[in-house]
Structure formats: C-alpha cells, structure tokens
Amino acid sequence: MPSPADAAPSYVWAAAIPEAGSSLTLDEQESRYLTKICRARAGERVTLTDGRGRRAQATLIQPGEAVVLEIVETQQVALERIATLLVGAPERGRADWMVEKLAELGVGFFQPIDTERSEWASSELRPDRWERLARAALRQSLRCHEMEVRELLPLPAAIDRALPQGPAKRYLADPGGTPAGRLSPQGTGHTVCVVGPAAGFSTGERGQLTSAGFIPISLSDARLRTETAALALAAWWSGAA
Amino acid sequence: MPSPADAAPSYVWAAAIPEAGSSLTLDEQESRYLTKICRARAGERVTLTDGRGRRAQATLIQPGEAVVLEIVETQQVALERIATLLVGAPERGRADWMVEKLAELGVGFFQPIDTERSEWASSELRPDRWERLARAALRQSLRCHEMEVRELLPLPAAIDRALPQGPAKRYLADPGGTPAGRLSPQGTGHTVCVVGPAAGFSTGERGQLTSAGFIPISLSDARLRTETAALALAAWWSGAA
C-alpha cells in the first residue's frame, strides 16, 4: 500500500500533451490511478508525461473517472543515453518482472530474440501486459521516456534492427568476458546489449556477435539466469548515468 | 523446462561432505532434483557443495528417492569477497524474487531491516521459503557459498551486527549519491550495502548512516523501487568480481 509520502508527487501518463493553458482529459486507467491510488483532489498540482520526452505541470480541475487537468507549463526532455536490450527466452514465468525492472532502470528498447538453441514460447510473450508494466514503471521511476517493447525477432534480424541507429557501444553478457567493474558505458549515445537464452548462444552465434563488435562482459563470478543477467546488464548501464 | 544442455553438469547440495572414498546419501529434495530434473544415472559424475565453501566431485552410485554418491575428491573454496545487504520492506509481493536474485548474484548475507517509516509485514517475511530460494540459486549459479538469510532487525541493530566483522566498505543506495559507474567495490573483503524501504529513510537515519561511513551511491538516473535498488546494488558489487 503506498504511503502518503509516495502518493504526494502525482505523476501520470497521457497519450498527447497540449500546450500550456489547454485542458486535457486523462484516460480511464490514469484517472483511476490519480483518483483512487494518489487520492488527488481538485486544485492539486500533477506532473504528466507522454513517455516520449514531453513533460508537463498541470492543475487538477476535476477528479473522478475522467480526470480533467489544465496544463500549466510543458518542457521537452532530451534523451542523451539510450540502451537497447536483446534478450533470449528466460525460463518460464520470469519474463514479466524482467520487463518491469528493465523499464524501471530506463532501458529504451526491449527486444525479445529467438536463437538457435531456444525460442520464446508464445505463452511467455505478453506484449500487452509488458506495455502496462512499462507504463507503470514510467510512473514509478518518474521518467519521461517509456520503454518500447519490440516484436520478437530472430537474433540476426534483431541485430540489424538495433544497429542502424548510428554508432553504438555493444556488449554481450558472457561469464568469460571482462568483469563489468572494469568496463564503463559512461557517456551519451546508444548502447546495445545482448543476453542469451537459458541454454546459451551457439558457438556460431557467439562468433557472429563478437565479429560484429559485441564486447563480452561478465556480470558476476558465477552463472546467472537469463533474466538476472539482463537485469544486471541494465543496472550496470543505468548506474553509469 | 531445462534443456539437455542445462541438465548436463549436475550440481547438488549436501549438509555435510565426507572425505574422498566415502559414500553419501542425499536428502529427499536433492535426490528428487538429481533424479527427476537432471535425470542423472548410475555412473555419472556429480558436483556437490555444502554451501559453506566445500565442494566435491562424486560418482552417482544409486539414483532414486535417496540418491547415493561416492565422493571422488574434495576441495575448500575460500570466500575472498563478501557482501551483506540490509534491505527495508519493499512493496507487497516483491521480496521473494529479490531474495532469489541476491542469492544468484552471490550476496553473502541478506538482512531485512525495520526502519522509522516502514516495517516488514509478517506475511512478507518468509525465511523458510527464502532459504529454499537461496539453495536453488546456489545450484543454479554453481556457487559453493550459500546466502544466509538473517532475522529481521531494526536498522541500528542490523548495522551493529553487520559491521563488527572487521573493516568494511559501506554504501547507501541514494538517488542523490555518486553514480555507481564512478565508484568501484573491487578488491577483496567485506562490503555492506543498505537499501531503504519504499518510503525511504528518515533524515535522522540517513544522517546516522553517512556518519557511520556509508557512501551514498546512485544506481540510476531515476527513482527505483526498493527491490530494484537492492538488485542493482548487488549487481554492481557482483560485477566487480
């Protein structure tokens, strides 16, 4: 249950944010969050974001099932660092919380990948739920860029899709790699990280990745589950902000 | 479902490991794991650990509900780096997976703490389940030191308990701290990390911690949930191994 301290700075999402002076009606889910969870009342200040870098201060005009806000001021927040995570299938039931945590840590793109040794089960792919989790993480973390969940791709296509966005730092989670503590993803720009499925990458896939400039990085001194490695890699990236 | 590749290196736990040449009967849970999950057969090589640094190679003599092994050789593995994590109450339902992930990342001691703003609900404290998760993480990560789950303590008592083990590096998860990427927990010895509850530490508690030498460390450029901060801090420590 949220404490009053948590509830104080109400932070919500809206699909589009109009200019200062305009009014805006929130959707049902955000209205419920603001009214029932935050218990916000008329006259209170609310912060909102569109999840694409636009943030606004607003005043709550009307609470209820369709909350009306009046925009006071807006700003555009640039994204100076962005991370894409390509992740093979974890064991069953472990994807949802991984997605939540990657979003909290500020990952920009979550890209599930099928690999030679392992494919995502269709029951484990829950894009609608993942988008709800990403939205909740956006609010929780007070970010203004929402993690985008991409459609499942085979590894080679996922690499092609991730890399043409310009030069990128590239890392491959690998127990035999350089310890994370000796590498740094500091600085601005795009970082692409790849994490294999529970069964690991094939020798051929690993070769393709290292040939493509992916630096093997060790995240612990022991074997990690797929979702734990994904989270550790995202935390390593996020902690260099 | 584990793939054949995962099942290959069978790794189990035993309360005590006798000298080479002796035989050993595994308990019911480890026997079931070896027989049903790993599908190990007579004659196969098995690795086992007591979770206190002793590791052994053994030969499977008899599979079934009470697996019999013969010890081939033993070794004692020293623990050169150790981390203690003091963690305030996360939101409901989030403690179990946090405990699993901390154990996978090699945390030595998990210490739940009650703080001024937040206490652990008794329904959220599940030491028996946490010990099973720590045991499973031990097997999963192929470690030979098991994470110890400590009893709930108020923050000041938890600090007293964590610190007398000798000199220790000390860190406090804090969004206003130094970015993790600019700090390094490299090297051997004891590291004590503290993570506040969802409602945060009080000003007084924060002052006590910084007076006691805890260095504020920022794990992301946004607000993290308690369990996410705990995991990011453990990953930061673990990645410097």
Image (tube, coloured by chain):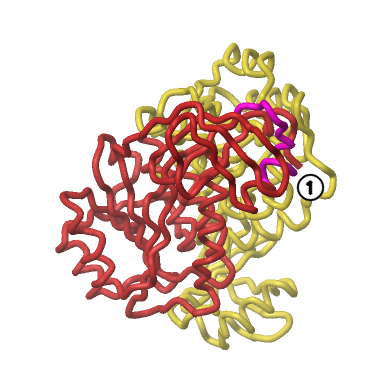
Chain colours: A yellow, B red
Specify the segment rendered in magenta. B33-45
Judge by depth and name the residue closer to the eye, A20 or B15: B15
**Could you tell me the amino acid type at mark 1?**
Leu
Q: Is residue B128 above or below residue B202?
A: above
B234 or A27: which is nearer to us?
Answer: B234
The N terminus of chain B, quarter of image: top right
Image point 48% across, 50% down: which residue? B15
Query: Between residues A145 and B58, which one lies in front from this camera angle?
Result: B58
Is residue B11 left or right of A94 when viewed as pictured?
left
The answer to whether any part of residue A76 appears in the image is no
Q: Residue at x 32, y 39 (%)?
A: B79
Q: Secondary structure at mark 1?
A: loop
Circle 1 residue? A125
Q: Is residue B87 left or right of residue A90?
A: left
Tell me if residue A28 can be seen. yes
Magenta segment includes B199: no
Task: Kindly give the residue lying farthest to the front in the view shown.
Answer: B22
| Residue at the (57%, 53%) spot, across then down | A101
Position of residue B6 measured from the top left corner of the image (x, y, whole percent)? 67, 32
The C terminus of chain B - image quarter: top left
Q: Residue at x 22, y 57 (%)?
A: B214
The number of numbered discs placed on residues in the rendered structure image is 1
Q: Position of residue A184 (x, y in %)?
A: 38, 31
- Between B96 and A105, the one lying in front of the other is B96
A20 sits to left or right of A14: left
Q: In the rendered structure, the residue with mark 1 lies on which chain? A: A
Residue A110 screen position, x and y as percent: 65, 42
Q: Position of residue B207 (x, y in %)?
A: 20, 69
Label 1 Cα crowd, 10 Å radius (few <14 / some 14-19 / many 20+): some
Q: Is residue A178 above or below residue B103?
A: above
Position of A217 relative to B128 (above/below): above
